Structure formats: C-alpha cells, structure tokens
Image: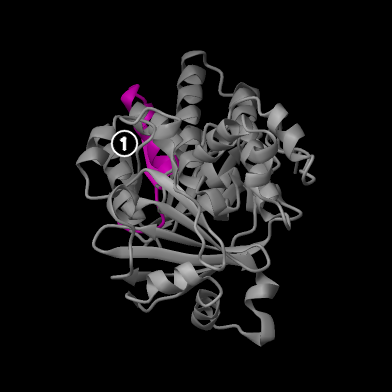
Amino acid sequence: MTYDTLIIGAGPAGASAAAILAEYGHRVLILEREKFPRYHIGESLIPFTFGPLERLGLIPKLRQSHFVKKFSVCFVQPDGQATQPFYFFNRYDRETVAQSWQVLRSEFDQMLLDHARDRGVEVREEMSVTDLIQEDGRVVGVQAKDKEGNAHEFRARITLDCTGKESFAASRNAWRERDPYLNKVAVWTYYKGSKREPGIDEGQTTVAFVPDKGWFWHIPQHNDMVSVGVVAEGKYLSRDGVKDPKTMFHREVGENQWIKDHLSTGASTGEYWITSEYSFHSRHCSAPGLLLVGDAFAFLDPVFSSGVMLALKSGVLAAEEIHRGILADDLSPEHFANYGATIRLGIENMRKLVYAFYSPDFSFRDVIKRFPDSADEITDCLSGDVNKDFSQLWTRIREFVPLPDDLPYGLPLKGWSH
C-alpha cells in the first residue's frame, strides 16, 4: 500500500501533522520507534501554543484535563529576589491565549497521538526507521525494522521527518548547522512535595538565575510533582571535575536561594537526567519527497519553552501545505519554501531573544526602562507570537548587546546530489 504521507516520529510535530492530513481524508502512516506513553522533557506550553491546539480541536480536552493551568512566568535573582509574575492576561484574552498548561509530556503526547488515531491515522509503534528509500532522485518511502528485527518497507508520496532533536534526515545528510554560541548543558530531575506559589500563581513557570548566565526552570505539574532543572555552560556545571549529574544539580541548588527554599520541603524522585542543549538548524527544510518538521528542522535552546509550540505550529503548517500540494499535484521542494521561511523567521526571532538573555549584564528590564513600549513586543515574542516584524525591537536591544545575524538555513533542496 502506498500512503499519501508517511511520518517518522509520533511526537507533537508528527501527531499534529498526521491528524490534520487525515482530517482532510489523506492516507497517513506514523512510524514511531518507541512504545507510547513514553518519557519526554519539555513540559511548559507557552501562550501561542493555543492556535495550533485550537486548529487540532484539542482545547476542550485540555480544559478537562488535570494538567496544571499556567497564567504567568516569573524571574528570580540568585539572592532569591523575584520579579512580579508576568501575567499573560495583561496582554491577551484571558479565556483563550492567556491561559496555558504545564503538561506531563508522556500524557500530553499520548493525547495528541490518540487524537491522530481518532482522525484515521495508522500508527505503528516500536518500528525503527533505518533508511530513506530514494528512487529517481526523490524519497519514495522508508525501510524500517520492528521490535523483533523484521525488515519492512513503506512507501508514500511524501515523507515527513518528525524525529525531534535526533533529526534523522539532517544528521544522515550532513545538513545540521550548529549554532556558534548556544551550546548549553541541562541537568534535571523531578521533585514531589516541594513548595508552590498560592492561587493563580501555582502553575507559573519560574526562571531562577545562577552565576555565569545559568538558570533553573521550576515547572509545577499535577500529582504534586515539579519538573526542575539547571541549564548552563558545560564547563561551568563540570567545574572542579564534577561529572555526576546528581552532584552537579545539587551544587547549583545552593546557588539560588529561591530554588533552595522551594525544594527544601520536597524530595527528588531519584533519577537525574543530563543532555547537551546545543541549538542547531537544518540547512534544508525540504528535498524531493521529504519535509522536515519540528525539532528535526531546527532545535532552539529551551530557555523560553518554545519547543512544543514550534513543533505544533510547524506540524499544522506542514499539513496544510501538503494538503494544498496534493490537491495541486505539486509536492516539489519549492512548494514548501513558504513553510520553511515562516518557521525560520519565527525561530530566528526567538533566537535573538535567547542570545540577548545569555549576554552578560543584559536585562530586559533595562530595555523596557529606556523604551517602555517595547515591553509588549518582548512579551509577544516570549509568548510565541514569533512571526511578526520585530525589527524595531532588535534595533533597540542592539543598543545594549550585539545580536546574531540570521543563519542561512532552511531552504528547499531542489535535487539530491550523490
């Protein structure tokens, strides 16, 4: 059987693209290496995740869920001094965009995948893709192995790479471009019973600073759990020869008084995770028969929790473009140039804010003090409204710190070279 669309990876990018394509009546197959539900980091949904979730028809399910509601974000200095919470409803509609969620990704991703199944998507779990099949200069499907090691072949008019940070196609074709500056390491764990803020602030995301431009995230979840981790340069976290993630984590807890206080009543669940959070982009968003979606296209430092929003946004946009392409009988790489440019612009805008955040001595407060009306633009970008013209904001921020030029990536690849 030949499918209209074959999707590698059942995370938010893959599941959202699949659901919409199936809704339009296309034959869609998802191949997923793992068995869902499965663990994944990245629990905080920023406000502009609302749009893709609404397009998918999932807002009612999220409203009925036990996920913790998130209305704000707060920043904390190493001495424990916290800003006032930044409430999204001061800028956006309280009933829609301004209320987000802190999710358990295993449950959230399962919800997305079940939604795709309900729309008619065929899903095969524990199926590892081993190779792209190319014929006459285009991808026509994939080779895969099931958990018993049996080989399978699947074919489709177009294949979507939604494999997340591992970026199957970009890695194999040497398309990955590392960001020259954003090379952080993250160490994290989960706490039960630690302190939370009262009332509406219970679900706020807290970004708590440690020296050398490092920071903690503190994300309250349901069942009295908190996701908490520290991100910094690897050489800072491993100073004095420390290599054990647990030792790294607990040493940094003492570097921020707010974090130390909030974790003092809780207990770690015992497992500590470590990963390099380097940012990268793929040189190409599409090639004949292939489209890259979500983190597989570009992965950005997670300081502003943009990953799930960008995955869902790119999944929805990719699906709409594929649907149009199928109707027009045009699934050429060039057909996806607008998709690539749209996602790239959003990521580049967010990336500029990330660069500013990590610059020594930079603070958004200083910018807002000099240019009070820039507060709204900063809020918009941080909230995920990233496809706007922020050129005035970048001109203003450049008075304080240098910002990077846009990276040359994401263009369609018109033909494979061998």
| Disc 1 residue type (three-letter) | Val
Which residue is outermost to the left? Answer: 64
80 or 360, which is in the foreground? Answer: 80
Q: Which residue is mark 1?
A: 121
Q: Pinpoint residue 17: horizontal percent, then vertical percent.
A: 42, 34
Residue stretch rendered in magenta on the structure: 11-37
- Label 1 crowd (10 A; few <14 / some 14-19 / many >=20): many
The relative height of residue 225 versus residue 61 in the rendered view (above or below) is below
Q: Pinpoint residue 53: horizontal percent, then vertical percent.
A: 36, 33
At 60% across and 49% down in the image, what residue appears? 300
Taking the image as drawn, is residue 124 in sight? no
49 or 203, which is in the foreground? Answer: 203
The relative height of residue 210 versus residue 89 in the rendered view (above or below) is below
Q: Pinpoint residue 240: horizontal percent, then vertical percent.
A: 68, 86
- The verdict on residue 12 being magenta is yes
Which residue is outermost to the top? Answer: 328
Q: Pinpoint residue 103: horizontal percent, then vertical percent.
A: 34, 51
Which quadrant of the figure contains the N terminus? Answer: top left
Q: Quadrant of residue 47?
A: top left
At 62% across and 23% down in the image, what residue appears? 338
At 39% across and 69% down in the image, what residue appears? 262
**Left or right: 412 in relation to 231:** right
Taking the image as drawn, is residue 105 in sight? yes
In the rendered picture of this protein, how many numbered marks are placed on residues? Answer: 1
